[in-house]
């Protein structure tokens, strides 16, 4: 069996999840990890028997490395991705692909010039619930799609956890903007967004937003995105998707996923959707078998443009055309 030698750049919360996922894939081997936090770096390297590098540039020189997962903070994606591409190394980059369209395009151009695979980590495309929604639309089960409603809410402390490095649209909304485009199967043509302002914001970013998205095929989507759930919310999240067609409808609810656990210490809704693990498995398979990746750099760029358009709409209080 072929094995992919892979490195992970950035060992924060999402980087650790990628390490866990890759460790469970028989055809993948974590050979190197990188992070500027020496304690986290050494602990992770020891856990996965990988070589530690504080500088990602040194990781890219690791003998035999074939691919990397870039899980650095959002605004630090460009340099490691471009450097990896120039080194001939395939790339799975966390969403968003970048925080500016200029950086996103630079990553795409570098990957194309070096002829390496570039995949963007939109995990919803690998969650069975959303795949079923995509299938229902594609197969015509719902008839002609009329409208879609997406909801993605997280706990109110999430902005503090990431220390205000971005707003809720870049952090959460970009997931739904991408999955709406994917499920609807059409390009967005306009966005109108409003942000709630009744509660004082701790950071200079949007905390809750409502966006109306018009697609080229006539479908209208509404996305409610926010981190406003109470800290003691049992699930810590409220994710929904409702699709209305002229011959049927689909209602998706990941808030409880049909599982609730009650104990003496309280109750919780465990996550049962292994989107990230499946995403990593597919990336590894695409590299080893030389197949096209299912989520391209261009997909990442379009989703970023949608978020930026929504932010522009909030600022201008006007419809923004893409």
Image: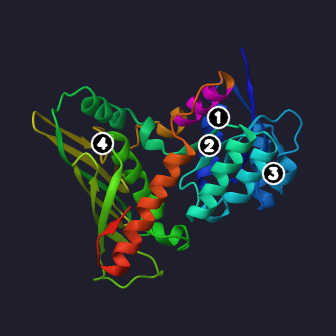
Q: Are marks 2 and 1 in contact (CB under 8 Å)?
A: yes
Q: Of marks 2 and 4, which one's residue comes earlier in the chain? A: 2
Extreme-left residue of the structure: 247
Decide: few, some or many residues near mark 3? Use Cα within 10 Å; few <14, some 14-19, many ≥20.
some
Residue 297 located left or right of residue 150: right
**Chief secondary structure of the magenta span?**
helix
**Nearest to viewer (mark 4 / mark 1):** 4
Q: In the image, residue 299 lies at what x, y percent?
A: 49, 46
* Disc 1 target residue: 22
Query: Could you tell me how far apart the alpha carbons at marks 2 and 1 are, in whole angstroms?
Result: 6 Å
Label 2 to label 4, Cα distance in Å? 28 Å
Q: Quadrant of the N terminus?
A: top right
Q: Is residue 15 magenta?
A: no
Where does the magenta region start and end?
279-287
Q: Give residue 231's mark.
A: none
Q: Which residue is mark 2?
A: 18
Q: Residue at x 59, y 45 (%)?
A: 17
Mark nearest the camera among 3 and 4 is 4
Which label lies toward us, 1 or 3? 1
- Disc 3 designates what residue? 42
Counting residues from the N terminus, which is met first, the one under dot 1 or under dot 3? 1
With respect to residue 158, does 94 lie above or below? above
Q: Secondary structure at mark 3?
A: helix
Q: Are marks 1 and 3 in contact (CB under 8 Å)?
A: no
Q: Is residue 197 above or below residue 24?
A: below
Q: Secondary structure at mark 2?
A: helix
Q: State the residue at coordinates (33%, 47%).
A: 180
Residue 205 shown left or right of residue 229 in the figure: right
Tell which of 171 and 188 is nearer to you. 188
Name the residue at 87% across, 41% down: 62
């Amino acid at each position: 069996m072929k094995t992919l030698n892979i490195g992970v750049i950035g060992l924060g919360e999402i980087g650790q999840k990628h390490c866990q996922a890759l460790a469970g894939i028989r055809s993948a081997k974590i050979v190197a990890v990188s992070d500027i936090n020496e304690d986290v770096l050494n602990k992770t390297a020891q856990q996965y028997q990988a070589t530690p590098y504080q500088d990602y540039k040194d990781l890219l020189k690791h003998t035999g490395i074939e691919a990397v997962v870039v899980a650095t903070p959002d605004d630090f994606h460009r340099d490691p991705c471009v450097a990896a591409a120039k080194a001939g190394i395939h790339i799975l980059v966390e969403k968003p692909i970048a925080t500016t369209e200029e950086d996103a395009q630079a990553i795409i151009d570098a990957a194309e010039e070096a002829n390496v695979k570039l995949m963007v980590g939109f995990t919803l495309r690998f969650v069975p619930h959303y795949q079923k929604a995509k299938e229902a639309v594609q197969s015509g089960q719902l008839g002609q799609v009329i409208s879609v409603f997406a909801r993605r809410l997280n706990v109110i402390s999430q902005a503090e956890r990431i220390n205000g490095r971005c707003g809720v649209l870049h952090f959460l909304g970009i997931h739904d903007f991408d999955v709406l485009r994917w499920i609807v199967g059409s390009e967005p043509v306009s966005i109108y967004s409003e942000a709630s302002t009744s509660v004082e914001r701790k950071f200079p970013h949007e905390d809750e937003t409502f966006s109306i998205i018009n697609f080229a095929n006539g479908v209208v989507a509404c996305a409610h995105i926010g981190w406003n759930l109470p800290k003691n919310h049992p699930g810590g999240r409220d994710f929904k998707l409702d699709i209305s067609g002229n011959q049927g409808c689909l209602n998706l609810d990941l808030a409880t996923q049909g599982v609730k656990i009650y104990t003496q210490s309280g109750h919780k809704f465990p996550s049962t959707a292994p989107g990230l693990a499946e995403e990593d498995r597919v990336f590894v398979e695409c590299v080893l078998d030389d197949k096209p990746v299912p989520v391209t750099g261009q997909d990442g760029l379009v989703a970023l443009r949608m978020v930026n358009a929504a932010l522009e709409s909030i600022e201008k209080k006007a419809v923004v055309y893409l």
